Amino acid sequence: MLLTAALALSLFNPLAWMTHPLSSHPAIRRAHVGAWSIAIARDRFSGTSGCSITGKDVSLHAGTAIFRLTRHGDTTRAVFRLDGGPPRAISDTFDAVQAKGFFPQRGWIVDPDGGEAALPASYLSGIGTVTWRASPKQGLRRIKVVHLDEAIATARVDGCQDVAP
């Protein structure tokens, strides 16, 4: 009977699920800014934070915005426009995004199946829409990036300096 009471209290006690400050499990905080989801994992032991910012068909990793353009395929000849500006070849960004860990021939290191294209996050400051043509044979695709600046600022307030330059 005492065992049953102790189990019942531990299941319904909100403090029972909190981790110890020296726990190796990270504390995760989630936030939303517009269509962006922010996840901030704070390692209580080391004091460091790791962040992820994701939106529909785009995610931010180490100052690089990674766009999911197709399920699979080569995007090395993709062309993009920022808010209806002039068309630009994705190949113009290869040096900047390779320095951050994105390799156009193999895709992002974590998900090397292709179909992705990357831009430096700094290109998207103040931008509302990125229009893509993944290859000469495909049609246009518009991906909204509205409120990305605010999402990055929110992540920085919580200690994430690695999300964007």
Image (cartoon, rainbow, N blue to C red):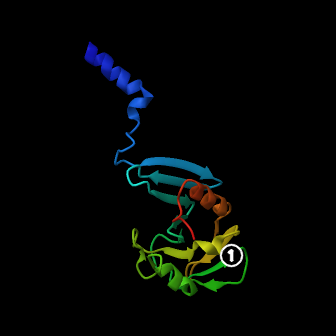
Residue 59, x across and y down, in percent: 53, 64
Q: Quadrant of residue 35?
A: bottom right
| 153 left or right of 100 in image | right
Badge 1: residue crowd in 10 Å (few <14, some 14–19, many ≥20): some
Which sits in the foreground, 6 or 108?
6
Which residue corresponds to mark 1? Answer: 82
Q: Position of residue 31 (x, y in %)?
A: 57, 49
Q: Which image quadrant is residue 20 in?
A: top left
Percent x, y for residue 119? 56, 76
Secondary structure under badge 1? strand
Q: Measuring 53% from the left and 63% from the top, which residue is drawn there?
A: 161
- The answer to whether residue 56 is seen in the rendering is yes
Quadrant of the rendered structure where residue 6 is?
Answer: top left
> Left or right: 111 with respect to 53?
left
How many discs mark residues in the rendered view? 1
Look at 53% across and 75% down and name the residue there: 118
Residue 141 appearing in the image: no
Q: Position of residue 74 (x, y in %)?
A: 47, 81
Measuring 36% from the left and 25% from the top, which residue is drawn there?
Answer: 10
From the viewer's side, name the closer residue of 86 and 138.
86
| Residue type at tag 1 | Leu
